[in-house]
Image (cartoon, coloured by chain):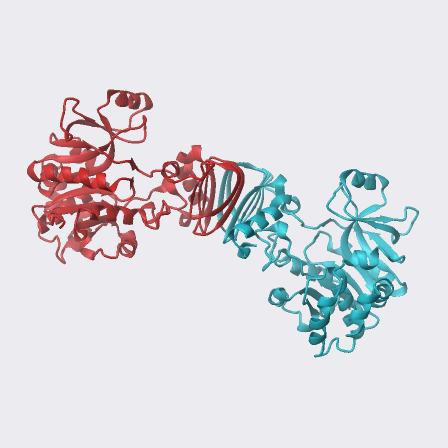
Chain colours: A cyan, B red
């Protein structure tokens, strides 16, 4: 029996443009079966959360344009569970809004906020970590996060510094640190009490709302004004009018970096943000020449270290190409060196500028 | 007014497997717009011949399976003009058969036999050369061919040696030479009286039929037996029963190499057999980095000497690839070094063995 007070907010409004051409504005990464497992990333994430959380308590925060994709890919989800942002305002406004809705429905709610497009190998460990956090949140006024043990000095992630003295698995956070340069990242890792910020948060509705009230009084007031309309027919009108007035601000900056009651649990599961073709490549099975292939039927000669993806069953013949991203879609073919994967955003911009927005 | 005695036999039964994956058994090269001009090769060839020859006198020799493609791409062609080979028997049987049909229809016919999948730049020169040949054939018992001035010692073509002493533009042929090795090819070129055999023949119906009668009496008799049925409803039954009995033999070997009355006109036009992706590449316009692009919208970085083809309007992004054949089709993507283009036949065989005949 799953606990009726457990809730989740699945963040599904992003675009994942470094996964172009598969990920596009009309059909972003989280709605693709990036791993070739038969499930899209949002389906995998939803099912992972549903191990612990009643399905009807999993809310999807997304953009209007992905409404249909959500219902298509998560057929058990009802309209009540889909929270649409009428404007792009970063993570804080939509999390506050969703938390107020959930609190109105269930004032004892504890919840997890999680990205819809990450990869987590060990689902049991994930559930165990979340369970520990939920137990803590139920009896403490706490803002909690799961931190990932860094494996190398990655400069693409934010870091969480926790109290070195803490003996418990639940560790008080000293501070959040923005994406560091390489030397700083190395320093963080040497110090041993730094974790990657994976954007996974847990708290009670009461705690997160009170954090907003204390740290972002204006934002809080904006959404508090609509409380009588939430979960009623009047909600849409209020949100359409007021949401665009919200400040564009991340939840990290709005409350996590400013609060004193922040805790982190070092995750005991393998995690990957699937942020780039290279990180996807790392997670996929490889053939004997270290090629990772999704969907394609390949005939490879003198080809190694490639990330190859096409529509299902397409024959891909490659001769003499190493460490390339080869991604074929209906309207776009990308043949790009893996080590330049960070430039794919630029390529996408270039393609849109040259050939039109429809390709992005 | 075009001369009603002028006829053409367009050879359109080949497969062009070195142009895989674009050219396949179900949809071979001659039915594709290989040059991206808006016309398929057979359309270009048909229109080139139609400058001199009445359209209704252009016959298409092809395989049953390409019947629909012929009518689709050459809408003015009627059933009478399409001669279907019920079995693969090389060029001699079908040319003899077509010549007998044409002679029965018009005993004064002179005709050109030409491949449907070659590239010829200067159409006026081509017409002029054919006109000279037709004039000669009308008043002489002659088997004529257009020879291409060799530009390098190509070992992939047959050569025609003509009489060095001949002053006239119409030169008696000493002998046909099969594909030579490199040293021999160099020798041919040094001698100055060798031309490439492009498979373009011209003769009167009377001369070619008499050449078959003298040199291939059995083959001649086989098709002569059906003469009463040709161009009537009885023809199909006769051909279905008798065609498979024909010897598998090329027209070069059957009559050209054995006859004394063979002449060659050195062609005054640029010619390319479009035999491989590389020869197509040579004929296409290039961008400033020597990339030849058909149909694709490209964004190329550090990419030169590539032959790129996709469906129309597909965006192809390539970074760091030189001298490659990049061909994308619905079900197949080929990324292959240009210098290994002769191996594409092997690749095709490998793909068919591995993934099934449908890919070839």
Q: In this image, B1 relative to B334: left or right?
A: left
Residue A313 locus on image (x, y percent): 50, 51
Instruction: Using the image as rendered, state which of residue B333 and residue B326 is in the foreground.
Output: B326
Asked if residue B248 shows in the view, the reply is: no
Residue B327 locus on image (x, y percent): 44, 44
Residue A79 locus on image (x, y percent): 66, 72
Q: Quadrant of residue A129?
A: bottom right
Q: In this image, A226 relative to B152: left or right?
A: right
From the image, which quarter does the C terminus of chain A lie in? bottom right
**Residue under the point 26% across and 23% down:** B188
Instruction: Using the image as rendered, state which of residue B272 and residue A133 is in the foreground.
Output: B272
Q: In this image, A95 relative to A290: left or right?
A: right
Asked if residue B325 shows in the view, the reply is: yes
**Residue under the point 12% across and 34% down:** B215
Instruction: Using the image as rendered, state which of residue B354 and residue B129 is in the foreground.
Output: B129
Q: How many marks?
A: 0
Residue A111 locus on image (x, y percent): 79, 64
From the image, which quarter does the N terminus of chain A lie in? bottom right
**Residue under the point 65% across and 69% down:** A76
């Amino acid at each position: 029996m799953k606990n009726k007070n457990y809730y989740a907010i699945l963040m599904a409004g992003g675009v994942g443009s470094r996964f172009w051409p598969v990920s596009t504005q009309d059909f972003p990464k989280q709605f693709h079966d990036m791993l070739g497992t038969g499930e899209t990333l949002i389906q995998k994430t939803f099912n992972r959360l549903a191990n612990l959380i009643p399905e009807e308590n999993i809310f999807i925060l997304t953009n209007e344009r992905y409404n249909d994709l959500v219902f298509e890919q998560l057929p058990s989800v009802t309209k009540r569970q889909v929270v649409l942002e009428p404007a792009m305002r970063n993570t804080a406004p939509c999390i506050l809004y969703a938390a107020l809705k959930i609190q109105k429905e269930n004032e004892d709610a504890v919840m997890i906020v999680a990205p819809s497009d990450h990869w987590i190998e060990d689902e049991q460990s994930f559930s165990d970590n979340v369970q520990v956090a939920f137990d803590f949140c139920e009896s403490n006024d706490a803002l909690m996060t799961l931190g990932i043990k860094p494996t190398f000095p990655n400069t693409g992630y934010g870091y969480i510094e926790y109290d070195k003295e803490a003996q418990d698995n639940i560790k008080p956070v000293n501070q959040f640190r923005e994406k560091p340069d390489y030397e700083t990242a190395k320093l963080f890792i040497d110090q041993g009490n730094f974790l990657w910020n994976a954007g996974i948060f847990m708290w009670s509705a009461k705690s997160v709302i009170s954090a907003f009230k204390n740290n972002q009084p204006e934002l809080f007031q904006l959404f508090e004004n609509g409380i009588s309309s939430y979960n009623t027919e009047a909600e849409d009108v209020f949100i359409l009018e007021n949401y665009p007035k919200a400040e564009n601000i991340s939840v990290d900056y709005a409350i996590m970096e400013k609060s004193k009651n922040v805790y982190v649990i070092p995750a005991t599961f393998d995690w990957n943000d699937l942020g780039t073709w290279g990180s996807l490549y790392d997670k996929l099975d490889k053939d004997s020449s270290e090629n990772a292939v999704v969907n394609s039927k390949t005939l490879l000669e003198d080809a190694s270290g490639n990330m190859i993806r096409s529509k299902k069953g397409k024959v891909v013949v490659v001769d003499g190409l190493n460490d390339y991203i080869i991604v074929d879609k209906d309207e776009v073919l990308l043949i790009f060196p893996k080590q330049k994967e960070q430039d794919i955003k630029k390529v996408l911009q270039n393609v849109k500028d040259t050939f039109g927005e429809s390709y992005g």
